Image (tube, rainbow, N blue to C red):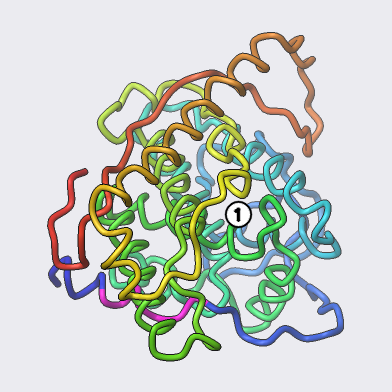
Amino acid sequence: MTLASWILCMCVHWAAPPMTADPLPLGPTVPRGQTVPRGQTIPPGKTAPLGKTPATSPTTARDVFVSALQEFQGIGAPQFQDHLTRFVDRWLARDPGAGPELARKHRTAVLLGLGTLFDAGDTLRQTPIVGSMLKGIATQEEKLIRDRICSHARLHGRHDAPKHFFLAAALTSRGGPAAATQAGLVKEFEDARRFERTPSEGSGFSFLDLAYDHAGVRFAASLLGWKAPEKLAQPPLPVASFLPDFTTLSLPERIGWQLYQDEYRGEKSDAILERIHSAIDENLVEVARHTAESPPEPDSDEPNSDEPEKTPGSSQKPGKVPANPKSGFTP
């Protein structure tokens, strides 16, 4: 399948299905921290603390997804971002300790599990590049719970930001930074065309959405060592390093297709993307500085220790916005 054909699959509308009003029980699934082999059910009992998974039980995307369902039930919108960043960092801190290849597999599983969590509407599930890998991760009952959680999900107070960030990261884990960034751009072009036809029903082209796409791509590229394989031997950077508050940048939104072509195509789009990446770069430096100034956390064997080891670093930028969906892309 060509790049163009699977990119078209990303034009599916990303809106989540209607949410139910009442909380949904998780039911007889697996206790927090338990390793969950694909397609199997483990009865309640002793749990495996985070960081203590044996080498014979490698992390799977389902492990991360089921743990997230249990973690975020009952978490409201105001507290969601703090819980989310701690949860992501805890899972990434589970070092397999057996070389870069196992580290890559573990980090990829974390990204795919998080992508499944925020894939309300099964957008990611329908893409050829990762869809086949997501079969069997979530049951129908679990998808209902997931959708309820997604209704409260927020990053910087924005409802769709977690979806943009973690779906872009999941796509990067399988297709690379250039393909994932292109997929997000095509989705915004489709939104612009829909907004042009029916302004009351569309969201239009949003540079703010695109900012969270690019941040997710850079997060995954850093984790997986794209163009910098040595990063696989380093502790992962905190996810917050890649999440400056983009809502403070006054990025343009609700742009129709014709307005994009007339005013934003080309150099103006490139300049806006430079602002986005500069904000990420500055945030990486600030988080690294704060980490260096903070006293080290004491070692703990508790299963839900919230503060993993943090190490400063940098990441590759995925590139510039092309003038239209058919143009080339520079990774």
* Magenta residues (range): 8-14
Q: Residue at x 49, y 76 (%)?
A: 14
Magenta residue check for 9: yes
Q: Residue at x 40, y 81 (%)?
A: 12
Q: Position of residue 188 (x, y in %)?
A: 38, 68
Q: What amino acid is at disc 1?
A: Val
Quadrant in which the C terminus is drawn: top left
Disc 1 target residue: 64
Label 1 Cα crowd, 10 Å radius (few <14 / some 14-19 / many 20+)? many
Q: Could you tell me if residue 46 is visible in this image?
A: yes
Q: Could you tell me if residue 135 is visible in this image?
A: no
Residue furthest out toward the front: 262
Quadrant in which the N terminus is drawn: bottom left
Q: Is residue 77 left or right of residue 257?
A: right
Q: Nearer the viewer, residue 220 or 193?
A: 193
Q: Is residue 167 above or below residue 173?
A: below
Q: Position of residue 251 (x, y in %)?
A: 51, 52
